[in-house]
Structures are given as C-alpha cells and as structure tokens.
Image (cartoon, rainbow, N blue to C red):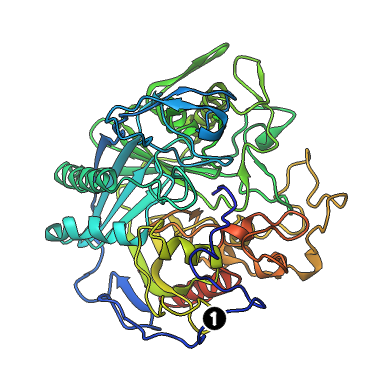
C-alpha cells in the first residue's frame, strides 16, 4: 500500500510522544464489541468444532463472477501537468455535472502524489467466488480486484449470506492500485475519505449474490495441484516479473495453482492461482480502472496466450486469483520485463501490466500442464482466529477520528489525546486453511514473504540483485533477523504452502521487529533515515509480533484429519 504522507494528526488532536498535550492522557472506557470481549481471542476449528462435523470424501465445487465497476459521473477535463492527479492549484479542471463547484471524482486507490480521478474502464473490476464443500465442511473464497476491504465490511458480507450456514467465507482482495478507493486514504484531499459508501454497499451486495450463485452451482469435482517459478526468461528468471524494492530483497518465487475439473470429462470448473506481487504495473499515470496484471493472468489461464512465438492453449473455466504476502514492496519496482513479444518494458504502464500478466499466465499454464493426476477428494479444514490489534500509528488515529477510514474502533476515549494508554483497538482475524495437499496462512494486510519462508541467507534472492545493498543509507542488519523456524516450517504434511495477503481485512504493512524504525521527530508521519516508508503505513511496531503469536496459537489448534 502506497499513499501520500499523512500530515493531519495534529488536526485530529493526536499527541506524538514527546510533544506537549493538553488534557489527561488516561485511557477511555472500553466500548467493547458485539462480537466478543475486549482483550480476548476466539477460535473456530473445523472440522471438530461446534457445528462442523468431519470432512467427507467427495469434493464439490461451484464458481461465479460479477463485474463491480464503479459509476463514473464527473471526470477531469484539463490535466495541466499530465500526471493523472487532480491539482486544482495548478489549474486542473473538471466537468461539474451537478453544478455544485465540487469535484465529485471517482477516486482510484493510489499510488501516491495526489488524488487520482478515474476517467473510464480499461478492463472490468470483478469479484470472483470459489465455493468448496467436502462433507459437512464448506469454504467459500471471494476474490476481488480491490485495494482491500476492512473487516467490518467482510463481516457484513458474511451476515448477508448467513442463511446458507457456510463454515467459512474468506474475502481476498488483490490489493489493486488501479481500482476504486475502498479504504479512504486516496480521496480529494487528506481530510476527505475517497470511499463512496454507496459503491462499497454495492460491492458487498454483488459479493453476496455471487456467493449464492456459486453455492447453487456446486458440482462434483476432482483437483490437480501445480506450482512453478514463472518469469519465462533464461537469464533473469523470476526477476523478469517481480522484484523487492526494500532490502532485504527476498521473494516468494512460487506460483501455485489448484485446478478443479469435472470427473466425467476433465473439463475445468475453476483454477485457483496464488502469486505474490503488487498489482501496480500500470503505473500512476493511468486513469482507467483495471485489474492490472491480474486481468491478463486470469484471461491467459482461461483463453490461452498467443503472443509472438508463444501459442499456449487455455484450460477454460473461471480463474480465481488470490494475492500473496506482498509486503513490503514486492512488485514492479526494479523489474524490466522482457515480454513474450521480445519488447523490454521498463516504465510502469498498462502495456507492462499486460506483458507481465501474459508471462505469469504462461507459467500458470505450465504448472497446470505439469500437475499430477486429478485427485477425487480434497479434505477441507481451517482454524479461524478473531483477535484485537492496537493501533499505535498516530496518523491512523487521525484517519479514524476524521472518519477517513470507514471502520469501527473501540477501547479508547476520542475526547482525550491519543497517547499511550488511550490507543484505539480493532478486531481482525487470521486463518490456517487446508485445501487438501495445499495449506494457506491468511492475514489482512501486507507482510513480507520472509516472515513465512525465511531467506535471510539469500536463498530466495534473484542473482540480479543483492540481498542487501550496503551502499543504501541505514541498511537492515541481518544479524538481528529472526532465526528459523519460520511459519512455513511449522506447517505439517503440506506439499503446497501458501501465504494469502489482504484476506478479511486491510491493515497496511507488517514490518518485522528487527527492521522496524520510526522517525524520532515525526513518527508515522516522516520516514526514518534510509528505506522505512512502510512503517508510516503500518498499524505499529507491535502489530507483527502480535500476529505472529496468534499464528502460533492457531497452528497449535490445527485439527488432525
């Protein structure tokens, strides 16, 4: 997640440590939450828990898809600097359809530099649903081309389909920076939310409708598991499609596919694909809504890739994309992508997004082609952990107080300074999810791959870049990095481990404690010396340690099948 630096905490009455604050800094009254008691974690274990019997031998799969394009009413008509950002002070103009002299733009989610109003649709923004049932265990994955959804909205979607009595609904956002702002921080200015509540309500409704459609379409299925390292470059390897712009440079190079086929004829119902990279290859100069590389990846899996000398058939069905652990800056940053057409794509543009999506699709089709025989059963299981996080980021406090973030917080008194002892708390959740021979750990934010797979020894660093560039200011000290085991090491009996990011919440970056640094004078507002942007868009230094401890508790509860 990238955004403009937030400089509004003083306007909201936030109190930075060391600054003078008026009024007592005592904690407020805990308002509690309807879903649980403050300070507690609640776990749902399935199968074996209440209301969730044993998994069955027969796998059933259903799929559905809906376009969720926003309605664009007012657009920018004059862009003096040609940078796609609306800058009234520079003379930019807009079509004032309603005549109120206020630019009612449909704001795009990032990247940075200013508010970016959309001018049209490049390719559809979609939500795609994969419904799975094995015996009495049901898991539904709702994958959307959005920057993220807050936990509150995920819970509302679950409530809307409560009558289906599904065991687990997982909302997975791609973290799309060419989609609409569903979080709030990319509005017309720093004090105004970029979220259109009517649009978010529409999205929730389409999600619920697609869940019902996929559930009604359940049919017997077999599953084939595949994985590969994409890139399609004999010299650059995976560095042809993804990089890490913040040291240490550590990538999860593996693209994983789960293909669900009909037992009678082997035709494809759906393909679940997991890959790790920020969908921002189109760059910040585009004003067209798009799913970025994800659109071309899904299209290639379904329809095939026919570019230059490449002629690979698709597998049909519906491709469902789930994002990986893409923090801190896993994406196009240092990538010069050599496309299947032989062209080198350096600048981030829609053409680069298409080229990278096509490259990834070829890798995904290879993974599918080389997958083993279809298996008749796929045991489903999960452990869901609902718990509290404390928001230590003072800029985030301002966003909550100014209602830029449309989510609930509790446990503090907003009439007192937001200081130690009076921090807001929010509910969120993580999951361990078993999909047969695959397992996923899900989290509602952007952790780096290293917390799942390690790599501090350089084993997950492309030859093209160093693990740590010591010429950079204030490089990370890997002597302080945590030793193994890492989270993937703690998974048992798994052939295809996955980390799913932006699932069921949007909490910004998770930065490991050894490399978490705040600016002494303006924490969360200014970056610390060196490469520490991500801390300014994180919940706080205790966020990852809290989540990591919760993952340990989750893994202790994994059911034995």
Q: Pick whichever, 322 or 191, lies toward us.
A: 191
Q: Is there any visible trace of residue 87 in the rendered image?
A: no
Q: Residues within 10 Å of mark 1 (few under 14, many from 20)?
A: few
Task: Examine the rendered structure and indicate whether residue 94 appears above or below residue 334.
Answer: above
Tally of numbered tags:
1
Name, please, the residue furthest toward the left: 163
Which quadrant would the C terminus be assigned to in this image?
Answer: bottom left
Could you tell me which secondary element the residue under label 1 belongs to? loop
Residue 404 image offset from top left, x and y in percent: 41, 56
Left or right: 414 as drawn, with respect to 91: left
Residue at horizontal 66 percent and vertical 31 percent from the top: 240
Q: Pick whichever, 90 or 107, lies toward us.
A: 90
Q: Quadrant of residue 434?
A: bottom left
Residue 512 image offset from top left, x and y in percent: 64, 66
Q: Pick whichever, 129 or 147, lies toward us.
A: 147
Name the residue that disc number 1 marks. 22
Q: Quadrant of residue 336?
A: top right
Residue 217 image offset from top left, x and y in percent: 17, 41
Residue at horizontal 40 percent and vertical 83 percent from the top: 39
Task: Examine the rendered structure and indicate whether residue 197 appears above or below residue 400.
Answer: above
Task: Examine the rendered structure and indicate whether residue 552 appears above or below residue 180.
Answer: below
């Amino acid at each position: 997640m990238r955004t403009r630096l937030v400089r509004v905490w003083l306007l909201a009455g936030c109190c930075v440590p060391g600054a003078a604050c008026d009024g007592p800094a005592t904690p407020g009254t805990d308002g509690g939450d309807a879903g649980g008691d403050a300070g507690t974690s609640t776990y749902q274990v399935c199968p074996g828990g209440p209301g969730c019997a044993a998994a069955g031998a027969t796998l059933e799969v259903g799929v559905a898809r809906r376009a969720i394009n926003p309605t664009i009413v007012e657009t920018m008509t004059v862009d003096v600097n040609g940078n796609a950002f609306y800058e009234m002070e520079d003379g930019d103009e807009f079509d004032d359809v309603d005549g109120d002299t206020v630019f009612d733009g449909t704001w795009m989610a990032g990247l940075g530099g200013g508010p970016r109003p959309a001018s049209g649709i490049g390719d559809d923004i979609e939500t795609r649903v994969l419904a799975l049932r094995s015996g009495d265990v049901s898991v539904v994955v709702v994958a959307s081309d959005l920057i993220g959804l807050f936990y509150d909205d995920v819970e509302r979607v679950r409530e809307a389909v409560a009558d289906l009595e599904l065991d687990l609904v997982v909302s997975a956002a791609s973290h799309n920076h060419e989609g609409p702002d569903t979080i709030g921080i990319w509005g017309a200015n720093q004090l105004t939310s970029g979220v259109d509540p009517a649009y978010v309500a529409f999205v929730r409704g389409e999600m619920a409708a697609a869940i019902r459609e996929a559930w009604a379409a359940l049919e017997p299925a077999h599953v084939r598991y595949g994985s590969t390292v994409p890139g399609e470059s004999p010299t650059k390897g995976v560095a042809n499609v993804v990089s890490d712009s913040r040291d240490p440079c550590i990538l999860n190079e593996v693209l994983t596919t789960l293909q669900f086929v009909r037992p009678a004829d082997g035709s494809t119902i759906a393909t679940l694909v997991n890959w790790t990279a920020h969908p921002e290859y189109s760059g910040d100069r585009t004003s067209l809504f798009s799913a970025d590389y994800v659109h071309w990846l899904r299209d290639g899996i379904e329809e095939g890739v026919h570019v230059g000398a490449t002629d690979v058939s698709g597998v049909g069905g519906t491709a469902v994309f789930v994002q990986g652990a893409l923090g801190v800056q896993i994406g196009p940053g240092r990538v010069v992508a050599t496309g299947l057409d032989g062209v080198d794509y350096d600048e981030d543009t829609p053409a680069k997004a298409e080229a990278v999506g096509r490259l990834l699709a070829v890798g995904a089709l290879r993974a599918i082609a080389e997958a083993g025989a279809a298996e008749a059963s796929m045991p489903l299981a999960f452990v869901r952990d609902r718990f509290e996080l404390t928001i230590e980021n003072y800029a985030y406090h301002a966003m909550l107080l100014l209602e830029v973030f449309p989510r609930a917080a509790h446990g503090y008194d907003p009439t007192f300074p937001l200081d130690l002892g009076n921090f807001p708390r929010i509910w969120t959740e993580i999951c361990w999810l078993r999909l047969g021979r695959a397992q996923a750990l899900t989290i509602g934010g952007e952790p780096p791959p290293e917390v799942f797979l390690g790599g501090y020894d350089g084993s997950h660093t492309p030859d093209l870049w160093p693990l740590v560039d010591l010429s950079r200011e204030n490089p990370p000290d890997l002597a302080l990095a945590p030793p193994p085991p890492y989270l993937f090491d703690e998974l048992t009996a798994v052939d295809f481990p996955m980390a799913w990011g932006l699932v069921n919440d949007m909490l910004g970056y998770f930065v490991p404690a050894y490399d978490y640094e705040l600016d002494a004078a303006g924490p969360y507002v200014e970056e610390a010396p060196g490469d520490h942007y991500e801390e300014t868009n994180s919940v706080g230094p205790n966020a990852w340690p809290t989540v990591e401890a919760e993952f340990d508790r989750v893994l202790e509860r994994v059911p034995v099948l």
